[in-house]
Image (cartoon, rainbow, N blue to C red):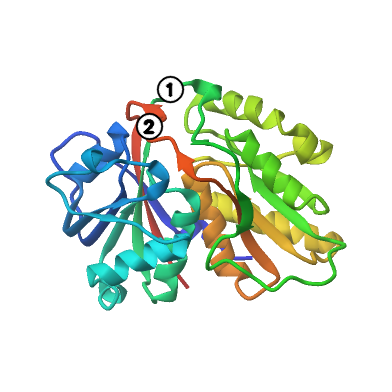
Amino acid sequence: MIDYTYFYKEELPIDGSSFETEYNVFISAYNSSERVRFVYEKSQATNKTWLVFPEYNYSDEELPTNEPYYICTGNTEADQIIGFFESSGLVNEIENSKISIDITGFMRPQLAFILMYLYEKKVKKIDLIYSEPMKYKKKENTQFSFGDVTHVKQVCGFESSPNNDTSQDVLIVGSGYDHNLIKSVCNHKEHAKVIQVLGFPSLRPDMYQENILKASIAANELGDDAMYNPRFAPANDPFVTASVLSQIVKECNDKNMITNLYLSPLSTKIQTIGFVLFFIYELKGKSSSLIFPFFDKYEQETSEGLHKIWKYTIEFP
């Protein structure tokens, strides 16, 4: 097992005109959240760029007017992210660049892939910024995505060749508010043993209860053991999340060696980072994959206010 406790996180000040650290590259996913705009304006970098993802469905009139942006195109998260780095001219410079990414507006597959991409490009350290909301607009009824799930597949960069023996397959689901996503993933791997990871402590006290209410709608798909005996990892700490995942997998292997392992981060963006770190450090090259339910559209704004801003310093092996 890897000791993830040496990774560093800190709370950034909300007051003041700008953050102290200056970067070569700062990237943020463009959406309508007040907190995303706030972090963009406070961040200092030589190269600042908005990534405009098609899933947010912005019209040309809604795009930034006085700030650089890149409209992500392509059929996959890999196409979108690689296209940006190649078109920006950064692809040959990023290994030695000081990089910061505001992950708040990212979709989880794109977030996972950009981290894997930077790892593969031999970037050793990056800072990830996340701004916590005061609340979600519709509480437990908040929808982050809308429309039907089109398919469940492996996230680009996190694929593996399956083991033909599926008798001890395990699916670890980081459950969030979108119960339809939980149902889709569990149905896609209905033969696997499901283990549910819930965000606790949550970002805000009421969010844990909201999360439980939504996850319970998928109780039939999760199964009794996953529903009533969940595991817990802090919603705002990717490093503890990675440690919890590592412990879960060790416990499973100690009982019966896992044949295929599937990870599905459907909760907070911060927990998604934990899933990615665990995969890169401990699962790469094994019969393991990151899977996600894909759909066409995301809500442009789901939250109100700004509670805290966190910086997570990621170091790749």
Left or right, residue 111 beside residue 280: left
Give the label on residue 166, or none: none
Q: What secondary structure is found at the residue carrying circle 2?
A: loop
At horizontal 86% and vertical 60% (from top left) the residue drawn is: 255
Q: Of label 1 and label 2, which has the lower sequence position? A: 1
At horizontal 66% and vertical 41% (from top left) the residue drawn is: 182
The vertical placement of 51 against 284, above or below, is above
Q: Quadrant of the N terminus?
A: bottom right
- At label 1, the amino acid type is Lys
Q: Label 2 crowding class (10 Å Cα cut-off): few <14, some 14-19, many 20+?
A: some
Q: CA distance from mark 1 to mark 2?
A: 9 Å
- At label 2, the amino acid type is Glu
Observer-nearest residue: 63 or 229? Answer: 63
The vertical placement of 234 against 137, above or below, is below
List the residue tagged with mark 2: 301
Q: Position of residue 311 (x, y in %)?
A: 35, 49
At horizontal 64% and vertical 53% (from top left) the residue drawn is: 152
List the residue tagged with mark 1: 137
Q: Is residue 281 visible?
A: yes
Q: Position of residue 47 (x, y in %)?
A: 18, 60
Left or right, residue 229 beside residue 304: right
Numbered disc total: 2
Q: What secondary structure is found at the residue carrying circle 1?
A: loop
Which quadrant of the structure image shows residue 97? bottom left
Dot 1 and dot 2 residues touching (CB under 8 Å): yes
Left or right, residue 202 beside residue 179: left
Which quadrant of the structure image shows residue 74? bottom left
Q: Is residue 237 visible?
A: no
At horizontal 71% and vertical 70% (from top left) the residue drawn is: 287
